[in-house]
Image (cartoon, rainbow, N blue to C red):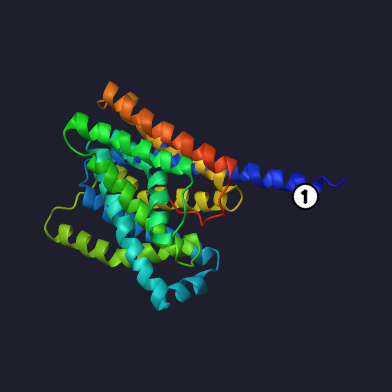
Amino acid sequence: MGTGPVSSEAQRARIGVFYALAAFFMWGLAVPLHFKLVSAVPALQILAHRIVWASVFALGLILAGRQWRKLVEALTSGRRLLLLCLSAGLIAINWLIYIWAVNSGHLVQTSLGYFINPLLNVVLGVLFLRERLNPAQVAACVIAALGVLVLAISSGEMPWVALALASSFGFYGLVRKIVPVAPLIGFCVESLLLTPLALGYLAFVVANGQSVAFRGDLRLDALLVLTGLSTALPLIWFAAAAQRLKLSTIGLLQYLAPSGQLALGVLVYEEAFGWIDGLAFSLIWIALGVYTASALRSPSPARKPVEAG
């Protein structure tokens, strides 16, 4: 007696964990492997195909779910549309850098970028949303900054790929946090806003004989079409998980994605990873541990979840 609501909540949480694991598995392993399979295609062409096919897939989901009125509302709302234009530009930059980095042998840096991202979100919250940091969060940010500094000193330059990924996705999350629109609707609007540019670029490369796609390689063509699926599915699964799980649980599970990218880069593609890299990543992991422990001890008010790229 009286166990019904508890059982229902437990079932809801289990389903949420399943969705979260599916999303982070795709972001950490399936998506970078997918892009590696189309590495013969220039990054800008992959990005254009990703935008176009993601738009087609998202539109199909919206029509199937009879949410087209919400889509029209988002497209005709001036302030929301302006903010979604900004978020669309930021996510396009993030996608382009990510695709180029994966296919140029920088998976380790992409993982670093997404390890840094949660801590950068904390800083952006302080700077733009007037959120306050507790001492543990300040310590976490300082330790993470030391990790980045170690990499910069050891390599003689800043880890620009990691910082560009973290900052573009961090600002994307900041914009999406203040836009009152459902995840799927927002993603579809962003994709639709970028689609004319993507189609224009694809038409240009076709006219100039530079297009790699649809020239007889059916396997490559199918992989490019499927970039829409591999883009939209984890975002939808993540949104489904965020509706069912505590923010602290999502925060812990989200580190699976960059962990997968790091493992792929080092173990599968044999990217360089010396003791200096180990030291820098150790500092980042310590920072994340401090931050996560602080969040679990004194959970902050629920925040709107942000889709990952």
Q: Between 151 and 266, which is closer to the camera in this rendering?
A: 151
Report whether 211 appears left or right of 291. left
Q: Between 151 and 183, which is closer to the camera in this rendering?
A: 151
Count of numbered badges drawn on the protein: 1
Q: Is residue 133 above or below residue 74?
A: above
Residue 79 in the image, given as x and y percentages of width and height: 40, 75
Residue 198 in the image, given as x and y percentages of width and height: 26, 61
Q: Residue furthest top?
A: 275
Residue type at the position of mark 1? Pro
Quadrant assignment, res 206: bottom left
Residue 208 in the image, given as x and y percentages of width and height: 11, 58
Q: Is residue 12 above or below residue 104?
A: below
Q: Between 187 and 281, which is closer to the camera in this rendering?
A: 281
| Mark 1 Cα shell of 10 Å, populated few (<14), some (14-19), many (≥20) | few
Q: Between 51 and 97, which is closer to the camera in this rendering?
A: 97
Report whether 109 appears left or right of 26. left
Residue 247 in the image, given as x and y percentages of width and height: 55, 48
- Point 48% across, 66% down: residue: 181
Query: Which residue position holds label 1?
Result: 5
- Point 37% across, 68% down: residue: 83
- Point 42% across, 63% down: residue: 188
Report whether 133 appears left or right of 94. right
Q: Is residue 158 above or below residue 46?
A: above
Q: Residue furthest front?
A: 135
Report whether 288 appears left or right of 240. left
Quadrant, the N terminus: top right
Quadrant assignment, res 223: top left
Secondary structure of the residue carrying tag 1 is helix
Q: Is residue 18 visible in the rendered structure shown here?
A: no
Quadrant assignment, res 176: bottom left
Q: Is residue 30 above or below residue 130?
A: above
Q: Is residue 197 visible in the rendered structure shown here?
A: yes
